[in-house]
Amino acid sequence: MKIIANPHHREHHAAHEFFRGAQVEAFEKPARQDRIHAALSTTDWAKFIPPTSFPEAAIEAVHAPRYLRFLRTAYAEHRALGGAGDAFPAVWPIRGMRADVEPVNFAARLGLYSFDSGTPLTAGSWAAARAGADCALTGAALVAAGERAAFVLTRPPGHHAGADFFGGYCFLNNAAIAAEWLIARGQRRVAILDVDYHHGNGTQAIFYDRADVLFVSLHADPRTDYPFYLGHADETGEGAGRGFNLNLPLPQGTSPETWFEALSVALERVQAHAPETLIVSLGVDTFEADPICAFGLRTETDYPRLGRAIAALGLPTLWVMEGGYAVEAIGANVTATLSGFVAASAA
Ligand code: Q9C
Ligand code: ZN
């Protein structure tokens, strides 16, 4: 399987984030991709390739031009104003306030284009995220050209980023950018299956009123878990998209057995859509020892089973890296998943 690894990911390295009132080392850190890369390198099937450059139009097909304009220069603006270290938003336009007027003030724009204070904007955030989008597009092009599958190995992740906002460690929605590119290239139906522990609120929002891109997600119940304000079971799509959004929220402490039952429901919905390409938003923060999550998936048994279950669909598949914060196990967990997929695809 070809692996498109983001060569610029290390440029996004947050010094810290806030967790329960304290400054802690950022969970979403460069070692995540490096560990996955090292683990995949020990297999006999992983073929690493660099991304090719895609035009900005492929990003603008998903993200609002004014959001992209902001992101490109945001860190430089922060520094020019005397900002030291990473930029954290501190003010947001909540209900009843105006989001349509772009403020002049930098802090006000930082809040307009974000939804949490847990996503530090660093000197290299744009460079890393933009290169990640190229990785996703490169992977989409490979699968569209007939590859059975490809893996987009990138960070920062993407599924919490919406058309015009960042958050949840995400800036550009790599899975959505890939899906939109496939549709623009003439595919009629694409499915995005999101197995990250957290609901992919950005991906859902981007395709919520569309029938061509199905979004299906298994995740921790938003009543208890991030991103809190989206991801409930009654969110089924709107307008033309009615019936093309499926959320399967699960309680904290969900066992592998229950998780795989939900996965079966998700896979049936994906099959019914008959997509030309399946995009899997792969988060391994479902791991039993993840430091900020609470599902129970195990390295040796459950991740290979996930890979095999996806392979059994027999669909051209683009895997896109999302979350997973147990850094010492992240390489093994991703490799176990993709090895299960590769083994079952060859069989
Ligand atoms: N400050 C993904 O897995 N908040 N994003 C965690 C720690 C946000 C996770 C609390 C979690 C976002 C892609
Ligand atoms: Zn996650």
Image (cartoon, helix red, strand yellow):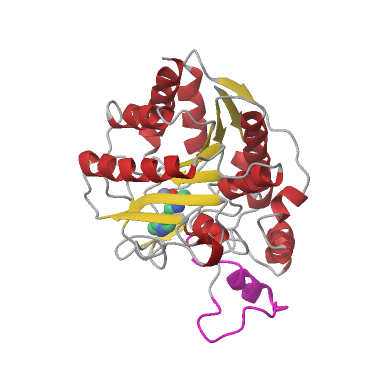
Give the overall secondary structure of the magenta segment.
Answer: loop
Q: Quadrant of ligand 1?
A: bottom left
Q: Residue at x 51, y 16 (%)?
A: 45
182 or 115: nearer the eye? 182
Image position of 70 with respect to 187: above or below: below
In the depicted view, which residue is nearer to us: 136 or 113? 136
In magenta stretch: residue 93 = yes
Q: Is residue 161 visible?
A: no
**Is residue 254 depicted above or below 154 in this figure?**
below
Q: Which residue is pictured at 36% across the width and 31% down the height? A: 309
Residue 105, percent across and down?
69, 77
Task: Give the vertical position of 261 relative to 234 (above or below).
Answer: above
Task: Please state the extent of the stretch shown in magenta in the rendering.
Answer: 91-119
Q: Position of residue 332 (x, y in %)?
A: 38, 27
Residue 239 image position (x, y, % from top left): 53, 67
Residue found at x 56% / y 66%: 114
In magenta stretch: residue 224:
no
- Asked whether the viewer can see residue 217, the reply is yes
Quadrant of the image for the N terminus? top right
